[in-house]
Structure formats: C-alpha cells, structure tokens
Amino acid sequence: MNWIILIIAGLCEAGFTYCLGRAKGVSGIEWWGWILGFVVFTIASMGLLAKATQTLPIGTAYPVWTGIGAVGTVLIGIFVFHEPVSFWRLFFIFTLIASIVGLKIMQ
C-alpha cells in the first residue's frame, strides 16, 4: 500500500510543478489560483511521502518520489507546455525510469 502512496506523492510533485508552469504566464486572481494549487499539491506530496517512509526505506522512497516527479514534470513540459523533444532528452527520461524500476526491484 505504501508504494501506491509513494506513486501518488510523486504524481502530486508533478502536479505542483504544473501549477508553477501555469502561474508564470498569468497575473492577478488567476495567479493566486495556480499558487493555491501549488501549495495544495506540495502539502499533499510531502505528506504522502512522509506517510510512505514510515515503512519504506528513505534511501529508496526519496529517489523514487523524486524520479516520478521529474519524469512527470518532463512529460508535462513536452505535452502541455510544448517544450522541445530530442533523442537525448528521451534517452535520459528512459534511463531515469529504469533506475526507478531498479530501485523498486532491489528494495
């Protein structure tokens, strides 16, 4: 169950970076809305990470959490914010995913 919590925590990390990306292009009340989303996702992400580390080793949980957030953020950047895609960018995303899977397998 704590692996599921950890995955959700990583997705929340990608969620708060998405909110930051949206907030940088707006102002006024809309900016505050995106910042509120950022705060909510940040609290959820950190809280779920703390919950997951009650039974998972921190040396495994933290890199997996960070990796899920990093991969999610890169994919959001590519698909939502139309950031450039290159062979090397995709190559390193896949190596990061392989590292996350490796940590799970070796845990």
Image: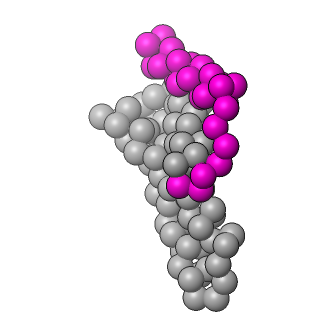
Check residue 73 for magenta coloring.
no
Q: Is residue 14 visible?
A: no
* Residue plotted at (63% across, 63% down): 20
- Name the colouring of the figure: one colour
Q: Nearer the viewer, residue 3 or 58?
A: 3
Q: Nearer the viewer, residue 86 or 100?
A: 86
* Residue plotted at (51% across, 14% down): 102
* Residue plotted at (46% across, 46% down): 11
Q: Quadrant of the N terminus?
A: top left
**Residue 106 in picture, x, y percent from top left:** 48, 11
Q: Is residue 54 above or below residue 102?
A: below
Find residue 58 and report its image quarter. Answer: top right
Q: Nearer the viewer, residue 44 or 51?
A: 44
Check residue 95 for magenta coloring.
yes
**Residue 93 in picture, x, y percent from top left:** 60, 28
* Residue plotted at (53% across, 79% down): 33
**Residue 28 in picture, x, y percent from top left:** 64, 88
> On the picture, is 27 further left or further right than 9?
right
Q: Is residue 20 above or below residue 65?
A: below
**Residue 4 in picture, x, y percent from top left:** 34, 37
- Magenta stretch bounds: 80-107
Q: Is residue 35 visible?
A: yes
> On the picture, is 12 further left or further right than 63?
left
Q: Is residue 80 above or below residue 6?
A: below
- Determine the main secondary structure of the stretch shown in magenta: helix
Q: Is residue 50 above or below residue 44?
A: above
